[in-house]
Image (cartoon, rainbow, N blue to C red):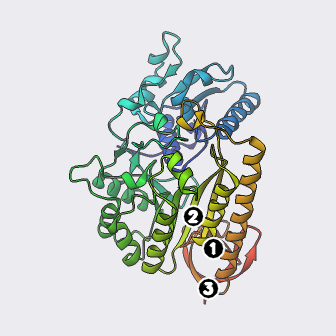
Amino acid sequence: MKISSKNKNSLPDIKTFGCRLNIWESQVISDLASKNDQSDLIIFNTCSVTSEAERQARQAIRSSKKNRPGAKILVTGCAAQIDPQRWNIMPEVDFVIGNKEKLDENFWNKFATKDLLRNDQNVFVQDIMQVKSTSEHLIESFNKHTRGFVQVQNGCDHRCTFCIIPFGRGPSRSVSTQNVINSINSLLKNGVKEIVLTGVDLTSWGIDIFGKPSLGLLVKKILKNIPNLDRLRLSSIDPAEVDFDLMDAFENEKRLMPHIHLSIQHGDDLILKRMKRRHLYRDVINFVKEAKRRRNDIVFGGDFIAGFPTEDEKAHQKSMQLISEANITYIHVFPYSKRKNTPASNMPQVQKKIIQKRAKELRDLAEKQHKKFLVSQIGTTQKVLIENNSVGHATNFSKIKLKENVEASTIVSTKILEINPDGLLGTIRK
């Protein structure tokens, strides 16, 4: 189904929290809700990966209701899916809907006609574990984005001991290759120059498709069938599931961007086992070395958790060591957040002040790593996709501000001059 928002006046106000998949889903929600003229709604697409993400959403809900007392507030997303009543009891909240419902055109049609509200019902959340398919919406454009996000997978079959997300997303399920290609073509027709493939567990794409094709095969088919796609990028991937074809694509397909963000989480092998991760320290190092051998301009990002239960100082230092040895450049640090009904919540907990201290140490190291990378870019020439205000991202995801005024959605060859407060400063290469 193709959906597009043409009437700006009917667009609902959507607040998005969390991952890139939520960005894609918020665009779908915006299109579906605007077709049914839900401009009086403020929709909160929530995240539940940490308690802080939920706190921020609750704070934003209270603030929005104060600023627009006449608006109706609808809460959806993973936090709403996992514990709908927690949001329903907030006096500011009018409706709570689940992750399946938020992408269902029939739901929005009924919601608009008030058919669903006749019995004063305001919570609409189905059992996400029973969902067997993905939503196959064709989005024509992203508001204010020259990069387009395309969902290729949803859900997760793994059970990391710290993670509540599988209970918000349901089982792993893949979008068909043809639908992915159709989605990308739809975006390209409307000026999008870079496509980012998103999912909850991206490297599990294909596990539920006949023949169990790999993510690498999907990437190769996209690039083969869409020759006018300038840039293809992956969101976070699991280092335990990278397949041969994906590595081959990074080596030989220059339109596949040389930036890999890895879901690493920790550097200590015992902690990784207690997390129920499927890789060890050496696996990350071996992967980084092999990827660098195949493509020397590749750079790496990574997610790390500080203060996981039972973590001691020695284990924490292994994360610091891994970041340095693997030369991780873009680092997302998450202070461990106790999630109800997860195995990790029953393990011996680390004191909050120690968690905060170790998270700061990781962030300080992350800042040093990123600055070292930025310095290494000075004097190089990079292809930059301009997004707005003459600011864009290079193929390696470095953020670059151009001295010249350059129109959005333009890819320009840029000489990097120096570091600036937001990243790098460059000028058009003559």
In this view, 188 is above or below 423: above
The foreground one among 240 and 394 is 240
The type of residue carrying mark 1 is Val
Q: Which residue is mark 1?
A: 406
Pointer 1 or 2: first along the chain: 2
Compute the Cα span from label 1 to label 2: 28 Å
In this view, 341 is above or below 186: above
The type of residue carrying mark 3 is Thr
Residue 90 shown left or right of residue 27 in the figure: right
Q: Which callout, 2 or 3, points to the residue nearer the camera?
A: 2
User: Number of labelled discs?
Assistant: 3
The type of residue carrying mark 2 is Gly
Pointer 1 or 3: first along the chain: 3
Residue 370 shown left or right of residue 116 in the figure: right
Report which quarter residue 320 is drawn in.
Answer: bottom right
Dots 2 and 3: beta carbons under 8 Å?
no
The foreground one among 42 and 326 is 326
Q: Hey, which residue is sitting farthest bottom in the picture?
A: 430
Compute the Cα span from label 1 to label 3: 19 Å
Could you tell me which secondary element the residue under label 1 belongs to?
loop
Q: Which residue is mark 2?
A: 301
Pointer 2 or 3: first along the chain: 2
What residue appears at the point 72 percent right and 59 percent down from the top-left corner?
Answer: 363
Q: Position of residue 191 (x, y in %)?
A: 48, 63
